[in-house]
Image (cartoon, helix red, strand yellow):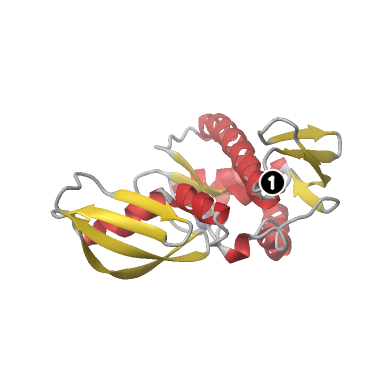
Amino acid sequence: MTIVGERKITVNGQTISYIIKRSTRAKHVRLEVGQETGLTVVIPSFYKLKHLPALLESKSNWILGKLTRYGQVQSLSDEKGPKSGDTISYLGRNLEVVKRQNRRNANSIKLERSRLVVAIGSASSRLNLILEQWYRMQAAKLIRERANKLSARLGLTYNRILIRGQKTRWGSCSYKGNLSFNWKLIMAPETVIDYVIIHELAHLKEMNHSKRFWELVAEHCPQWREHKKWLKDHETELADKLSR
Ligand SMILES: [Zn+2]
C-alpha cells in the first residue's frame, strides 16, 4: 500500500482531512475511520482520484457519524446544538426539547404536544445529531408527499427528490428535473414549505426568475411574497439552529 497524499473535503459545512492510500489488492474504494487516524481512503490502483470527492460526499453521513463518535469533529459537539430545555422550531411551531435517558440502548424521538422528547440510548449519542436525523426523516417524508400532490396540481413532473443540507439554499431544480430541498425547511410552516416546492416545480417549466415564472408561482401560491419574506426573515435563525 502506498500513501498518495493528504486531502481535504468540506461536507455539510465540516472540513475533513483524509489520507489516500493506493492498494494493488483493493477492488473497491474502502473507507476506514479510526479513533487516532481519522479518515483513510484506500483506492484500487486503477481508480481515478477525480471521482473521489463525489464518492465521499455520498458517504458523508456515515463518515461524519463515525468521526463524531470518535470526537474528531469538534463543532459537532452538543455545546453548539440545542440542549434540553431549548426551544426548536418544527413546522412553524416552537417545541421544547426534552432529553431523557433511554434504558434500552436505542435513540427515539416522540412529539408530545409542544414537546419533543428525545430518549438517548448510549452516552456517546449526541443530541443534535439525533435531532438532525429525525428532522431529515420528517422533512423527506413531508416534502415527498407534498411534491407529489403539488406536481399533479401544476401538471409538471419531476425526476427525483433529494433532501440535502445546503448552507445557503432552501431548494433547487436541476436541468435533469431533480428537485433538491434543504431539510431545515421542516422548521418552517407548511404553507412556506409548499411555496418552496411550488417554486422549484415552476422551474421545471421556467428555468429562470422571469415574469412568467412568478406568474406561474402566483397562480398556485397567491401568498408567495409573504412566504418568501418569511424565509428571508428566518434564514439566519433556522440556519443556526441545529447547526454543526
Ligand atoms: Zn428559483
Residue 105, horizontal then vertical, whole percent = 66, 33
Provide residue 132's location: percent of width, then percent of height.
63, 47
Is residue 126 in sight in this rendering? yes
Please tell me how crowded label 1 is: few (under 14), some (14-19), or many (20+) other residues with Cα within 10 Å. Answer: few
Residue at 76% x, 33% y: name it.
110
Considering only vertical position in the picture, is 46 above or below 136? below
Please state which of residues 87 and 71 is positioned toward the viewer in this rendering. Answer: 71
Please name the residue shown 57% across and 43% down the image. 198
Q: What residue do we see at 65% from left, 40% from top?
A: 134
| Type of amino acid at the residue the image marks with label 1 | Ala
Between residues 43 and 152, which one lies in front from this camera angle? 43
Q: Toward which corner of the image does residue 234 lie, by quadrant?
A: bottom right
**Along the horizontal axis of the image, is 151 left or right of 59?**
right
Residue positioned 55% across, 62% down in the render:
73
Residue that carries the numbered disc 1 in the rendered image = 123
> In the image, 140: left or right of 111?
left
Query: Is 226 placed above or below 105 here?
Result: below
Residue 239 image offset from top left, x and y in percent: 65, 61
230 horizontally vs 207: left or right? right
Q: Return the x and y of residue 203 as percentages of the image width and height.
A: 46, 49
Viewport quadrant of the N terminus: bottom left
Which of 225/87 is in front? 87
